[in-house]
Amino acid sequence: MPMYVLIVTSFKSGSDIGVTSQWNLPETWTLKSWEKAWDSLHASFIRTFELAVPVALISSVIGAANGFVLSRWRFPGADLVFTLILFGMFIPYQAVMIPLRDIVTTIGIPPGIPTLVFVHCVYGIPICTLIFRNYYATTVPEELVEAARVDGAGLLRTFGWIILPISIPGFVVTVIWQFTSAWNDYLFAIFLSNTRNGPITIALNALAGAQSPDYAASMAGALITSLPTLVVYVLLGRWFIGGLMAGSVKS
């Protein structure tokens, strides 16, 4: 029902919009609200891809490397390292906002999308590590790693040439998770960027306005904003559940 109101309102003109007429179909179908929304959002739409795609790929690869090392290389203190990494999952965003901004400023990371890529990658490493560690520990046979070791492959070569090609289920899960998290984020975005260099969530909030909101344009903007994550789920959703459950039980 909310989706119905969202869609039909986005095609209405200003005179058609009202509390009593929100359920009615448009008297005159128009794309002016979509054009207005796209004019306001297209620059941030591209910037959000520049944010979400690197975040999904970088944090997934780092999580896969961490997961492989922590599941197969039982060095002293491995369990402690894994626990400390997982601890990062439970740190509220709000608790670290000010020191986080000081850190990225001290490091010299440019404001806007580069800062958000760094922050989302750091926050995404714990969940990606957890998913891949469970996947490698319970799904990838130990004999496969031992065979690579016998053939003379070291840790890095085993990971790059043997483990990564069979890690597609895990990557599907982490890529969807990280892409969606980065695309939909508003808290980090509003704190570490602005409408000139930030992602689409900030631009959508600016489009909605405060004093005299354009409801039709806001609805169209919300649909435009949600389309990429919808496409990702449509294309990869069939593998998402299988990848999420892979490694959940030991065969």
Image (tube, grey):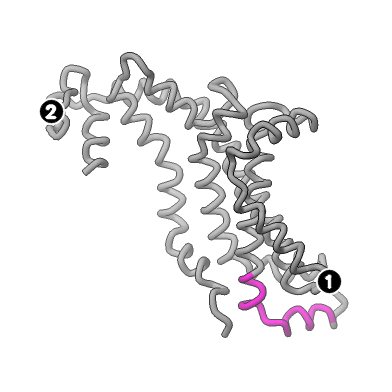
Residue 182 sits above or below residue 217 on the image: below
Residue 37 is marked as none
**Residue placed under numbered mark 2 in the picture:** 21
**Is 167 left, or right, of 238 in this rendering?**
right
As drawn, the residue found furthest toward the right would be: 152
Kindly identify the residue that appears in the image at 72 percent across and 58 percent down.
84
Question: Which numbered disc, 2 or 1, marks the residue that appears first in the sequence?
Answer: 2
Residue 153 sits above or below residue 219 on the image: below
Q: CA distance from mark 2 to mark 1?
A: 66 Å
| Mark 2 element type | loop
Kindly identify the residue that appears in the image at 16 percent across and 26 percent down.
19
Crowd tier of the residue under label 1, counting other residues whose Cα lies within 10 Å: few below 14, some 14–19, many 20 or above: few
Q: Nearer the viewer, residue 50 or 72?
A: 72
- Magenta residues (range): 134-149
Q: Give the amino acid at mark 1.
A: Phe
Q: Is residue 7 magenta?
A: no
| Mark 1 element type | loop
* Of labels 2 and 1, the one closer to you: 1
User: Which quadrant holds residue 68?
Assistant: bottom right
**Residue placed under numbered mark 1 in the picture:** 75
Q: Position of residue 10 (x, y in %)?
A: 27, 29
Kindly identify the residue that appears in the image at 76 percent across and 65 percent down.
80
Q: Give the amino acid at mark 2.
A: Ser
Residue 86 sits above or below residue 124 on the image: below
User: Which quadrant holds residue 173?
Assistant: bottom right
As drawn, the residue found furthest toward the front would be: 95
Kindly identify the residue that appears in the image at 50 percent across and 71 percent down.
245
Q: Position of residue 183 (x, y in %)?
A: 51, 40
